[in-house]
Amino acid sequence: MCYGHQRSLSPDDLIPSRNRRSENDNTSVVEDLRGRLAETEARLERARAREAELSRRLEEMKRFVSVMEILESYLKRRFREQQEHVARLFSSVPAKCT
C-alpha cells in the first residue's frame, strides 16, 4: 500500500451536497436582501416625494400667512383712521342742550 499519495479528506468531501445547499441558501439570502433593498429604496423615494410636497405646501402656507398679516395690519390701521375720523366729526358737532 502507498500512503504518501493520498490527500486528507475535508468535511466538504464527506458531504458533497452541503456545498450546493449553502450556495442555494446564499443565493436565496442574496435575492431576499436585493428584494428588501428594492422595497426600501421605493419607500425612500415615496418619502422624498412626500417631503417635497409637504415642503411646497409649507412654503405656500407661509406666503398665505404673510399676506394675511399684511391685510390685518392694513385693516387695523384703516379701522383706527376711521375711528379717529368719526371722533373728529363728533367733536366738531356742537352739543345740543335740552
Image: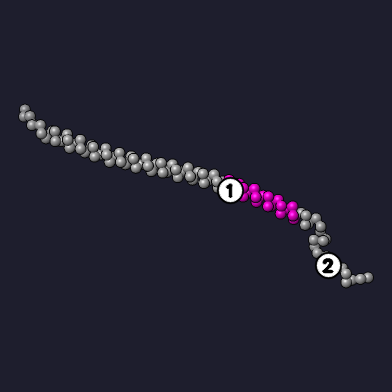
Going from the N terminus, do you reach mark 2 or mark 1 first?
Answer: 2
Q: Callout 1, which amino acid? A: Glu
Residue drawn where x is 82% and y is 61% of the image: 13
Q: In which quadrant of the rendered image does the C terminus lie?
A: top left
Chief secondary structure of the magenta portion: helix
Residue 63 position in % (x across, y down)? 37, 42
Residue 86 position in % (x across, y down)? 17, 34
Q: Which residues are magenta?
A: 22-42
Measured along the vertical axis of the image, is residue 10 above or below residue 58? below
Label 2, label 1: how far apart the Cα atoms are: 48 Å
Q: Is residue 69 left or right of residue 31?
A: left
Measured along the vertical axis of the image, is residue 70 above or below residue 3? above
Mark 2 neighbour class, 10 Å CA radius: few under 14, some 14 to 19, many 20 or more: few
Disc 1 marks which residue?
A: 41
11 or 62, which lies in front?
62
Q: In which quadrant of the rendered image does the N terminus lie?
A: bottom right
Nearer the camera: disc 2 or disc 1: 1
Q: Which element carries disc 1, helix, strand or loop?
A: helix
Residue found farthest to the top? 98
Residue 47 position in % (x across, y down)? 52, 46
Q: Quadrant of residue 84?
A: top left
Residue found farthest to the left? 97
76 or 97, which lies in front?
76
Residue 80 position in % (x across, y down)? 21, 38
Q: Callout 2, which amino acid? A: Ser
Residue drawn where x is 41% and y is 44% of the image: 59
Q: Is residue 30 left or right of residue 91?
A: right
Q: Which element carries disc 2, helix, strand or loop?
A: loop
Residue drawn where x is 77% and y is 57% of the image: 19
Disc 2 marks which residue?
A: 8
